[in-house]
Each structure stands twice: as structure tokens, then as C-alpha cells.
Image: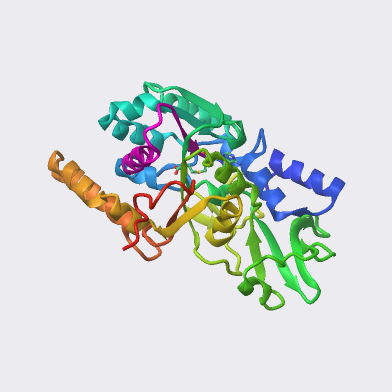
Amino acid sequence: MSDPSPLEKEIRRLIAVGGPMPIARYMSLCLTHPQHGYYVTRDPFGAGGDFTTAPEVSQIFGELLGLWALSVWRMMGEPDAVNLIELGPGRGTMMRDALRAAKVLPKFRQALSVHLVEISPALESLQRHNLGDADVPLTWHRHLIEVPEGPAIILANEYLDALPVHQVVKQADGWHERVIGLNANGDFALGLAPDALPQFDRFMPRKIKEAPVGAIFEWRNDIHAFDIARQVRGGGAALLIDYGHVESDVGETLQSVNEHAFADPLSAPGMADLTAHVDFQIFGQAAASMGAVVQGPVTQAKFLRELGIDARAEALRRGATPEQAANITAAVTRLTEGGRTGMGEMFKVIAICDPKLGALPGFVPA
Ligand code: SAH
């Protein structure tokens, strides 16, 4: 066996000192440990990386989101100054494409201050490089709460799935936190906290309350939804795109992806991406409890179609070589197709907005 990585040693030390740690703590260390976290040490996107995201599949994705933001700004009454915030911008590709599309309305571009919320210094550098020629003010933050208040439009693609998730397991006496400890050989091993979490499912949907013994339920801290809801209270809207389920359900979705293949989440901490599905029901409820209005979720396919992905692809194909045209068609298929290979049905889009705004583009009832 190869030597444990510095992060593995650190996690073993933390367990030795403090006892078994919740899955969420492990996930947080794996992804965002200040020196050894997965996002902190590398650029994981694209064919050469571990996974590919929608903005990396096609420029159309970011362009449509830029036009969505423009429409929302109009619905907000065209404020002279608006914060355009992106959570977890990756390579900065989506913001670059969105800002290019926003050029169609100079008044909108002039109103923009762009705020990028990125935990990883390495990805922040990449974003600075890729957004270097944007002629709008750009500011980086580690956390959303650091972004100044004011009218805001928030965009986030594949951000929520990277936030730490807790797992709890139903036992006869209630729900117990799932933890990672060390077995007799000194290897990482899953276990359960000895005491049930008091009243854990009191405010949970019925499906969770009535789950059988042995069921696993994953949940994230509501603070993420609260922070987003608070930020749009000044008349704005947030758009979040991610894979997940529309209704809360039991089941384990925590997964580890390394070089486009699944791996064991407990092996090689910090070397692979760890994600879990987003529970849009709980997320929406938390945002609504702060006074925000929730629209959707709708599937990514439906959302992109309503925003005009087909017309935009057709326009791009007109000026393209046959090979480029085929690539554009393939990218649109990947973004909108259902099934396990396509992103169209697995990914959902949800909006969180100020109650003053009506139905947002892409969420207009049929
Ligand atoms: N939106 C991009 C990248 C998605 S990957 C795309 O679609 O390509 C997740 C992004 O969120 C990365 O930029 C990662 O560094 C960032 N991130 C992960 N955890 C974070 C946290 N707790 N706070 C802020 N950013 C985080």
C-alpha cells in the first residue's frame, strides 16, 4: 500500500483526538481543506479532469443564463446597480459566457458588479485569468455573506452538490448520525453515533418520518438556503442548477468521482470529487421559511428549451463549419437529453426570489 496522503494523515489524527467524525466533516475536509482539499489543489473540470459540467459542454449554457439575468434585472425595474453573484464558479467559463451575452444591453452591463464566491485560491486564480478582459468590476469572496447587500442576481451551477452532506441512519430509537472512525487495522470505517439525534425528524416530510429502520437520509445545513434567501430579499433572484430529487427521499447518493469513474468515498481523501444529490424540497422549504418565493424545480431540459436553446444553437450553426455544427448539436443533446447519459432530466433548476417578482423566465406555468 502506498503512503497515506497528508490529508489522510490529518483526518486520522483528527479522529484519534476527537473520535469518529460526521460524514459532512469528512466531506468538507476532503473538498475544501485549506492546503489539501480537492478543489484547493487542482482544476478538476473537462476531458483531462475528473468531470465535465454544463458550462464546459457548451458556451450556450452560460449565454442563456446571462440573458436570464438580464430579463430578471428588467423585472426588478432596471436598478442602476445590481450585484451579479456566482457561487462556485469553477473555471469562470459560465460567467465569461454570461457577460458576453449581456453585451446586447449596455445599460445592463453598466449596472453590473460581479461577485464570485469561491473557496479555492487555485480556482480563483483560474477565474481571474479567464475573466481578465471583462470590463465590469469583479470581486472575489470566500463566502456569500461577505458580498455587500443590495439588489442581487445569483447564479450557481453544480455548487450545492459540493456542499457537505450529513447522513443519518434510522434505528429503533431514532436517527443516528453516520460517522467515520478507524477500525482495528487503523483503516477508515463507517459507524453510527451512539445516541439518536433528539427530535431529528420532527419537521421532516412524512416520507422521512415513516422510513423503516436501516434507512439512510442525507441532509445539508439550511444555512445555505437561508443565506441565499437573505441575499435576494432586496428585490432579486437566485438560480440554482444541480442534480437531485424534487421530493425528499431516503437513500444514499454520496459519490466519489475520479477521472470520470466512480470510486470509494473513503479511499484517497482529497484526491477525488465528493458530491451528493440536492434535496430540492428541503432546500426550497428552508428558503421559503425566510420569506423568499420558490419557483420550480423544473428539469434542465425544460428550462433551457424555454430560454431558447434550440434557436441559439441554430444561429450558431449558421456561421459554423460542418464539424463545428455537429459539435453544437451534440452539446445541445447532452445538455437536454434524458436518461443516465444526458443532463436534461437528471439536472433540475430552482429559483429563489423576492416575492415582488412574478414568474421568472423558464418557470412560466404552461
Ligand atoms: N460552477 C462550476 C463549478 C462547479 S464545481 C461549473 O459548473 O463548472 C463546484 C465549485 O464550487 C468549484 O468552483 C468549487 O471550488 C466551489 N466550492 C466548493 N465548495 C465551496 C464552498 N464551500 N464555498 C465556496 N465555493 C465552493
Q: Residue 319's quadrant in the figure?
A: top left
Q: Answer whether residue 66 is magenta in the image.
A: yes
Task: Please report the residue visible at 36 percent of the width from the left and 24 percent of the height from the top.
Answer: 110
Specify whether residue 323 is in view. no
Of residues 41 and 207, the one drawn nearer to the viewer in this rendering: 207
Q: Is residue 272 left or right of residue 309?
A: right
Q: Is residue 269 left or right of residue 298?
A: right
Task: Please report the residue visible at 57 percent of the width from the left and 62 percent of the height from the top.
Answer: 253
Count of numbered marks: 0
Specify whether residue 221 is in view. yes
Q: Answer whether residue 192 is magenta in the image.
A: no
Residue 283 location, x and y as percent?
A: 57, 56
Residue 366, placed above or below residue 126: below
Residue 167 location, x and y as percent?
A: 68, 61
Residue 249 location, x and y as percent?
A: 58, 69
Residue 290, placed above or below residue 111: below
Q: Residue furthest right?
A: 17
Query: Magenta residues, as a range?
Result: 63-89
Of residues 204 and 121, the one drawn nearer to the viewer in this rendering: 204
Residue 212, placed above or below residue 181: below
Q: Is residue 193 left or right of residue 212?
A: right
Q: Is residue 256 left or right of residue 183?
A: left
**Which quarter shows the C terminus?**
bottom left
Of residues 42 and 6, the one drawn nearer to the viewer in this rendering: 42
Residue 139 location, x and y as percent?
A: 51, 25
Task: Please report the residue visible at 39 percent of the width from the left and 47 percent of the height from the top.
Answer: 54
